[in-house]
Image (cartoon, grey):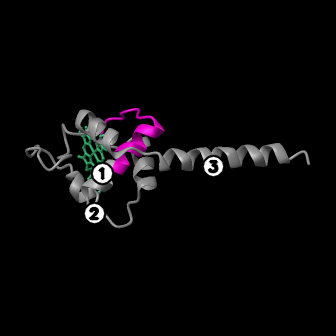
């Protein structure tokens, strides 16, 4: 009985997280991608090429085992060759949804 509140709490947290993922907004992600990622990545079809070795989002979006969850997680972790952009979880989910939409 004493453990019930903790279990309920973690259920609420899990539900909250998956809700956040479901509410991911690819349109908003595109705005963020153009602001934060376009210096190194080609983030949209109408963008001219960038210098450097960063893969275009249309390529990243086609990686089969890269689902929105993994992408969002990747974006929250510091990346060796990428600056830590301090994105919020919601922003990361939006960008992940946008990248996926570019791979279609
Ligand atoms: C300063 C340049 C730079 C910026 C800014 C940048 N990236 Fe990158 N990114 C890179 C480079 C370079 C790589 C390739 C890294 C490697 O091969 O180790 C990469 C790799 C990635 C990968 C992994 C691709 C794979 O094959 O695993 C993802 C996903 C990614 N970037 C997303 C983003 C997103 C989203 C943003 C904006 C929020 C962003 N990047 C901003 C340079 C950048």
Q: CA distance from mark 3 to mark 1?
A: 24 Å
Q: x, y percentage for residue 78? A: 40, 40
Compare marks 3 and 1 and give the one earlier in the sequence: 3
Q: Residues within 10 Å of mark 2 (few under 14, many from 20)?
A: some
Element type where label 2 sits in the image: loop
Q: CA distance from mark 2 to mark 3?
A: 27 Å
Residue at which label 3 appears:
14
Ligand 1 under 8 Å from disc 3 Cβ: no
Residue at the spot of label 1: 99
The spot of residue 96 in percent (x, y) is: 36, 49
Q: Quadrant for the C terminus, please.
A: bottom left
For marks 2 and 1, the one nearer the N-term is: 2
**Residue occupying image coordinates x 27% and y 57%:** 60
In the depicted view, which residue is nearer to us: 70 or 21?
21
The answer to whether 104 appears left or right of 51 in the picture is right
The label shown at residue 62 is 2
Q: Which residues are magenta?
A: 82-97
Distance from the alpha carbon under mark 2 to that under mark 1: 9 Å
In the image, what residue occupies the spot 49% across and 48% down? 21
Which residue is outermost to the left? Answer: 48
Q: In the rendered view, would you say 36 is above or below 102? A: above
């Amino acid at each position: 009985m004493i453990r019930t509140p903790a279990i309920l709490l973690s259920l609420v947290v899990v539900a909250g997280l998956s809700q956040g993922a479901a509410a991911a907004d690819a349109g908003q992600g595109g705005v963020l991608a153009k602001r934060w990622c376009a210096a190194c990545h080609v983030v949209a079809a109408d963008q001219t090429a960038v210098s450097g070795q960063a893969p275009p989002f249309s390529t990243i979006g086609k990686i089969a085992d890269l689902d929105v969850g993994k992408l969002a997680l990747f974006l929250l972790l510091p990346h060796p060759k990428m600056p830590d952009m301090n994105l919020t979880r919601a922003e990361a989910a939006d960008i992940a949804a946008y990248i996926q939409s570019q791979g279609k």
